[in-house]
């Protein structure tokens, strides 16, 4: 059931309630008046049920939107991460290495947090690269010492 259907049904019930309410103004016997009042109560219950259905539909639509956003976010992350593979560097560090584009390394700790942080060469003899995201250091390319 969509919003238009709920709105139409609600309007119809409101009109029926008004019609029944008009009957209570007529000079009718007590038994008929009791039945009219019962009908008014039933129409009111139906209106309440439609209102609850509308609220539940809004809740479900919001949940659906959040789930779709989450799926899209996961798919985007999987696509980004697929451009890397876990590799051991010549310095012994286990990092993510790019498989396309400019050759570079990414921090595995940050990847666990769903972030790609490109490791930056410190240009030191130890060959350490630093992660700008978490600050960890990785021995990526040890340099040869010149004597």
Image: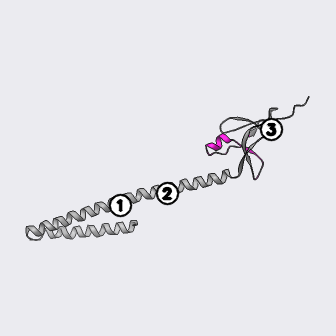
Left-right relation of 56 to 129: left
Left-right relation of 74 to 28: right
In the rendering, which numbered label is found on residue 141? Answer: 3
Marks 2 and 3: which is nearer the front?
3
- The first of marks 1 and 3 along the sequence is 1
The stretch drawn in magenta includes residue 103? yes
Residue reaching furthest to the right: 147
Element under disc 2: helix
Q: Indicate whether 112 appears above or below 23.
A: above
Other residues around mark 2 within 10 Å, as few (<14) / some (14–19) / many (≥20): few
Residue 141 position in % (x across, y down):
80, 38
Which quadrant of the structure image shows residue 127? top right
Residue 142 position in % (x across, y down):
82, 35
Colour style of the rendered protein structure = one colour
For the record, the magenta segment spans 100-119
Q: Which residue corresponds to mark 2?
A: 65
* Quarter in which the N terminus is drawn: bottom left
């Amino acid at each position: 059931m969509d919003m238009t259907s709920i709105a139409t049904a609600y309007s119809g019930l409101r009109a029926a309630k008004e019609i029944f309410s008009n009957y209570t103004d007529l000079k009718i016997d007590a038994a008929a008046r009791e039945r009219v009042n019962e009908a008014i109560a039933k129409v009111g219950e139906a209106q309440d049920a439609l209102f609850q259905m509308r609220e539940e539909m809004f809740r479900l639509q919001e949940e659906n939107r959040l789930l779709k956003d989450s799926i899209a976010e996961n798919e985007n992350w999987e696509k980004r991460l697929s451009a890397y593979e876990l590799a051991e560097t010549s310095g012994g560090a286990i990092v993510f290495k790019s498989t396309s584009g400019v050759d570079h390394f990414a921090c595995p700790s940050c990847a666990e947090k769903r972030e790609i942080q490109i490791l930056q060469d410190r240009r030191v003899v130890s060959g350490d690269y630093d992660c700008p995201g978490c600050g960890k250091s990785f021995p990526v390319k040890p340099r040869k010492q010149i004597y």
